[in-house]
Image (cartoon, rainbow, N blue to C red):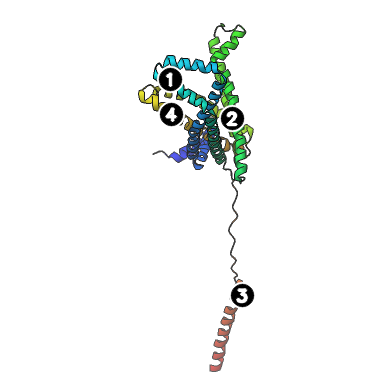
Amino acid sequence: MPDFPALLQSLRERWRWFDHILRAANTYNSQKGDYYAAGITYFSILSLFPILMLSFAIAGFVLASRPDLLDDISSAITNAVPGSLGETVNSLVEAAIDSRNTVGILGLLGALYTGLGWMSNIREALSAMWSSRSDAPNFVMTKIVDLGALVALGAAVLLSLGLSALSSGSVIRGLLGLVGLENLPGIEYAIRGTALALSLLATWALFTVIIARLPRETVKLRSAARAGLLAALIFEVFKQVAAFYLESVTSGPAGVVFGPIIGLMVFVNVTCRLLLFCTAWAATAKENVRVAPIEPPPPATLIPRAPAERRSGPVLAFAAGAVSAVGLSHLLRR
């Protein structure tokens, strides 16, 4: 029967990357990465509802300022859904526009609450992967810092979405059409390669910002960039698998109803686990491994003892006295 611990140890000594992966997995499990990923997933799904409310409110403000656009939408609804049902849908749209202020305020407050909860969870999770023991500030200061981090992350997400939009094939074809290069041989493969490179660059930048700036301690940008590149490469592969999964689960009647929700939950949870594992991978790099502090020994107990010379004095005196007594008694008998 093979000795698996010895075989595993030999593989770790032979391949440094394998040893690094095992150290990262050990840190991920010891710091309860799955539990943190579940909490982040909960707040991510919960934040969708206030974001949708806020989106509906913004759409209501746009339609209220554009009566011509509202008339076009009403006409399209009437043509698509004739009869009383079309009138009901139009009345619901008008009611949503009339209540845009209330819906917008509730959506903004809900998005702020869930967003801060999401940010607090992800920052605590990323800090746990680094085994951070720094004392957190008070509650108000923590929420202010989390709000600033949420705004900064939102800006990074917008930048990443902008790069992803530029990576679409239609945009690249349009740019090539402006310079008259859309009919070059092999241009389709060049477009796909450029789109993939830009998408990978956008994902890499986003993961690097998250790993470097969201933990509650200072992280080296070099380590964060390496971990961000690893996360981006795995995430691009995972996106292709997720697209195939969603296409397969939404083919049936039940999948049309429940498939997108389940797919979204799985996608968010796996992405959170990937982010936390790559953060643990950065934390267990050679340049970031901290030397464990050596605990001081317990206090020693001193027990006084007499020297050996002093202990032998009474014994020698007793022996001398015994010899003298024997000699004296012998003389008296003579």
Question: Label 2's element?
Answer: helix
Q: Which mark is residue 87?
A: 1
Q: Which residue is mark 3?
A: 310
Q: Nearer the viewer, mark 2 or mark 3?
A: 2
Residue 99 pos. (x, y %): 51, 28
Give the image location of residue 16, x and y in percent. Answer: 55, 34
Under mark 1, the amino acid is Glu
Left or right relative to 292: residue 45: left
The residue lying toward the viewer, choosing from 212 and 64, is 64
Dot 3 amino acid type = Arg
Q: Which residue is mark 4?
A: 261
In this rendered view, identify the residue nearer to me: 235 or 1.
Answer: 235
Label 2 environment density (alpha carbons within 10 Å; few <14, some 14–19, many ≥20): few
Q: Nearer the viewer, mark 4 or mark 1?
A: 1
The span from disc 4 to disc 3 (Cα, nearest Å) is 88 Å
Label 1: element kind? helix
Residues at circles 2 and 4 in contact by the CB criterion of under 8 Å: no
The amino acid beneath tag 2 is Gly
Quadrant showing the C terminus: bottom right
**N-term mark: 2 or 4:** 2
Residue name at image x 45 percent, y 40 percent = 5
